[in-house]
Image: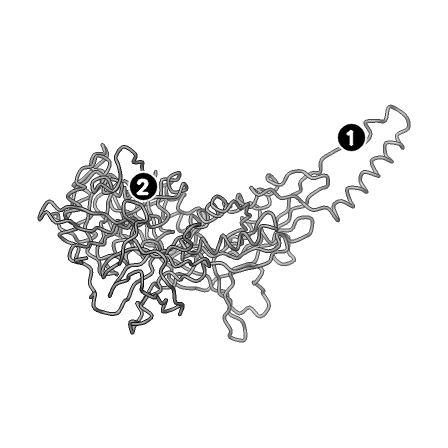
Amino acid sequence: MDKSLIRNFSIIAHIDHGKSTLADRILELTGAVDKRTTRAQLLDDMDLERERGITIKASMVRLVYRSKANGKNYILNLIDTPGHVDFTYEVSKSLAACEGAVLLVDAGQGIEAQTVANYYLARDNNLKVIPVINKIDLSSADVPRVKRQIENVLGFSEEEIILASAKENTGVEDILEKVIEVIPEPSGESAHPLKALVFDCRYDPFKGVVVFVRVMDGKIDSSTQLKMMNAAKIYKIEELGVLANLQYTKIPELSCGEVGYFTANIRDAREIVIGDTITDNKNPCKVALPGYRTVKPLVFCGVYPVNAADFPALRDAMDKLKLSDASFVYEPETSQSFGYGFRCGFLGLLHMEIVQERLEREYNLNLILTVPNVVYKIKKRNGSLIEVDTPSKFSEQDLEQALEPFASLLMIIPVDSIDPVCELAKSRRGTFVSSDYLGEDRVKLVFDIPLAEIIVDFYDRIKSLTKGYGSLDYEFKGYLPTKLIKLDVMLNGVVCDAFSSLMHKDKANFKARALVDKLKELIPRQVFEVVIQAAIGSQIIASQRVRPMAKAVTSKCYGGDITRKRKLWDKQKEGKKRLKQFGRVEIPQEAFLEVLKI
């Protein structure tokens, strides 16, 4: 394959700026799908993606396009990427396998926070970026204003910007012609020893683990004995091919610059590491590719099966999910309330929600999630520093200083929303850093803010305050000192570790009251009284009671002496007292989900 006729590119944008729709039009234009049988979001192969209208995983497809400029047939390897801040790792994986990127900007909304973040991500990977203003057919489109934003914020000239409407199929051909003209051909030499990057994987029940690779140097054929350089494992190829027309298509070899897949009868999902380098076992390359930076999870929570017998199935499901989501981390843990489960790390709350839904849908599991926490650091009096990602690890003994993670928060909002947004950020312990006007009606705000304050509902609040026009992106900054306490919830005097959480001291009273009030609503009435208490150490700071269900034990008494009724009431009281000591409080699963929102 002549590598001068290969172009590897990605589509990047803020969420809901039209990436998937543009990918659909490109697939139709290149004849990869039949227009009669096509559907929306062709590259989004998960039901969850189509239901929510968002891209969760990066998807790759190989296309053939005949250029109008020179009449040559080009191989285009297109990688569609997510737009939400929680899935930035998927974007970085995709960009490592490309030479260029198409940057979409909504003609109505203009530049958003993830637009800027993804642009700099592409620049950091030394990619050629093609700016495109999409959705020019909308009645709310303001193309001159968005052009000025792109020129001022991103530094492009007006001549470089392409106008398009993926929905109306306008400008799509211009984008492909620009991709061929501007994006360079792949680097590397076919004569060099094989060096290929593992940039994605997925599990197929018939093929086993399907490994997607980008060949940087050399070539792969069906007789090549592959070696994973970091894992130090050797494999014999069972099937080699490309994803042409959204189908697995076998080919005899993958040459330098191409993107494809292989299978090697790999059944254990843990054998493959995303970002590993593949080489020829007989003629290996000397230096491995740098791979991907290790992503540190920002949000942690416990995941437990409702039925304890499902624990082995949950472990297998997490191994397989890890294949397609390298940013997801987990380790076994035991809870007093739920038994055996896993402590899982996520990049954000949406990421946590998506992983839960995928585990429940794809692997038919019923799960309970505990209250999410960020990772704190505890400095002890002996000078040692430990990481605390769960309340059970926190102890005030030998505590000298507590440190909590801070993030640099970038928000792009309408000018008339500055006051309420700044008030919200300050109420969440944020510190103002800078502001920069992006034209007449948009402003960029930067705050330093504790990560724990933004992971749950901050994005929803920003959307409400800005009437849907605000956007945000955040980046981990470092650890700073804080006043940290552990808030425990007790049900009838027994600590329920699923509701325990770590938080700033100033927030404890408010959250404790909100927590016990919400649990009073959610815990159904039992045959005995349930006392709900929130405590810091031995100090009770909030309390509520759930009244027991009443049974008219005297209904069979018709008249007679009052002592007979009192005898029945006393007997009932003793029974309820015994039940309160030995009975188990039933907590509905909705209670755990509702607590996340407090």
Kindly identify which numbered label has been placed on residue 141.
none
Residue at 50% in and 70% down: 385
Q: Residues within 10 Å of mark 1 (few under 14, many from 20)?
A: few
- Circle 2 sits on which residue? 42
**Residue most extreme to the front:** 223
Residue drawn at 55 percent across, 68 percent down: 399
Q: How many marks?
A: 2
Dot 1: element: loop
One can see residue 113 in this view: no
* Residue extending furthest toward the top: 558
Q: Nearer the viewer, mark 1 or mark 2?
A: 2
Q: Quadrant of the N terminus?
A: bottom left
Q: Nearer the viewer, residue 142 or 225?
A: 225
282 relative position to 152: left or right: right
Amino acid type, callout 2: Leu
Residue 552 image label? 1
Q: Which secondary structure, mark 2?
A: loop
Which image quadrant for residue 139? top left
Query: Which comes sooner in the sequence, label 1 or label 2?
Result: 2
Q: Residue furthest left?
A: 70
Q: Position of residue 234 (x, y in %)?
A: 39, 67
- Give percent across and percent down for residue 336: 64, 55
Which three-letter amino acid code belongs to the residue tagged 1? Answer: Ala
Could you tell me which residue is drawn at 37 percent across and 52 percent down?
87
